Image (tube, rainbow, N blue to C red):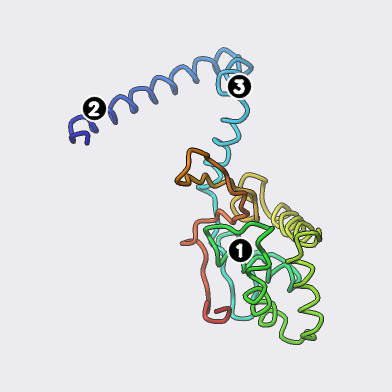
């Protein structure tokens, strides 16, 4: 285990490296060679940097008692979604660990319960039919609903900020006892949960 001095020396080295990168970046920018700067950074890393920059602009998301979705720090702009989209969103919001689309049938009971509370006046049979479509791995309904959710957020913010709010793909690395390494494809909402404000979370428990 590294001692405190080693950790401190490593931290100092990283800080010095960051200062050098900043200085050289400014030199390239001043010389008008943003082409070389982009080549040095690379597009994938640039995307990550833009997402990290967007993290500082995230708004709290308030879930009201009557299931309105409000972006608290964006002048309480409402995320205008239909009850079925809200039910799907709340399901994934409840599972920060992520859910595999092909395993959605395992969450049928939970999704039905949320949907019934969000759409109090909707016929139970219609709710169950909708949930059957959403949890059927051979049906495209869940992809359509996630696409609608994504487009709604994109109308309210830039794509890098929206990436934290939408239901997006994530690969989790699994290390079984054998030598074989495999990845589980999950869908998650990456918005830090401390930014989610529930007026009453018990409503969907």
Mark 2 surroundings within 10 Å by alpha-carbon count, few (fewer than 14), some (14 through 19), many (20 or more): few
Q: Quadrant of residue 45?
A: top right
Residue at image coords 63%, 70%: 107
- Could you tell me which secondary element the residue under label 1 belongs to? helix
Mark 3 and mark 1 lie on one chain; the one further toward the N terminus is 3
Q: Is residue 178 left or right of residue 167?
A: left
Q: Is residue 186 above or below residue 198?
A: above
User: In the current view of this chain or complex, which residue is farthest to the top?
Assistant: 31
Q: Nearer the viewer, residue 36 or 72?
A: 36
- Could you tell me which secondary element the residue under label 3 belongs to? helix
Q: Quadrant of residue 14?
A: top left
Image quadrant where one finds the C terminus: bottom right
Residue 24 position, x and y percent, is: 46, 16
User: How far apart are the two marked residues, 1 and 2, measured between alpha carbons?
Assistant: 41 Å
User: How far apart are the two marked residues, 3 and 2, measured between alpha carbons?
Assistant: 30 Å
The residue that label 1 is drawn on is: 92
Mark 1 and mark 2 lie on one chain; the one further toward the N terminus is 2
User: How far apart are the two marked residues, 3 and 1, measured between alpha carbons?
Assistant: 35 Å
Image quadrant where one finds the N terminus: top left
- Marking on residue 38: 3
Q: Are marks 3 and 2 in contact (CB under 8 Å)?
A: no
- Could you tell me which secondary element the residue under label 2 belongs to? helix
The residue that label 2 is drawn on is: 9
Residue 199 position, x and y percent, is: 53, 77
Mark 3 surroundings within 10 Å by alpha-carbon count, few (fewer than 14), some (14 through 19), many (20 or more): few
């Amino acid at each position: 285990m590294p001692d405190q001095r080693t950790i401190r020396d490593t931290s100092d080295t990283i800080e010095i490296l960051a200062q050098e990168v900043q200085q050289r970046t400014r030199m390239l920018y001043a010389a008008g060679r943003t082409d070389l700067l982009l080549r040095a950074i690379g597009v994938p890393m640039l995307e990550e940097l833009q997402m990290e920059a967007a993290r500082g602009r995230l708004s709290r998301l308030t879930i009201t008692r009557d299931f309105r979705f409000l972006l608290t720090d964006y002048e309480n702009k409402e995320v205008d979604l239909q009850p079925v989209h809200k039910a799907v969103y709340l399901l994934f919001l409840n599972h920060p660990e992520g859910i595999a689309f092909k395993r959605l049938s395992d969450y049928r009971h939970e999704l039905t319960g949320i949907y019934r509370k969000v759409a109090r006046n909707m016929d139970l049979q219609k709710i169950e039919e909708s949930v059957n479509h959403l949890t059927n791995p051979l049906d495209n309904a869940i992809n359509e609903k996630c696409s609608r959710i994504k487009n709604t957020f994109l109308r309210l913010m830039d794509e890098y900020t929206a990436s934290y709010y939408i239901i997006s793909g994530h690969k989790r690395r699994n290390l079984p006892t054998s030598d074989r390494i495999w990845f589980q494809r999950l869908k998650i909402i990456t918005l830090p949960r401390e930014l989610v404000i529930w007026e009453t979370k018990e409503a969907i428990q």
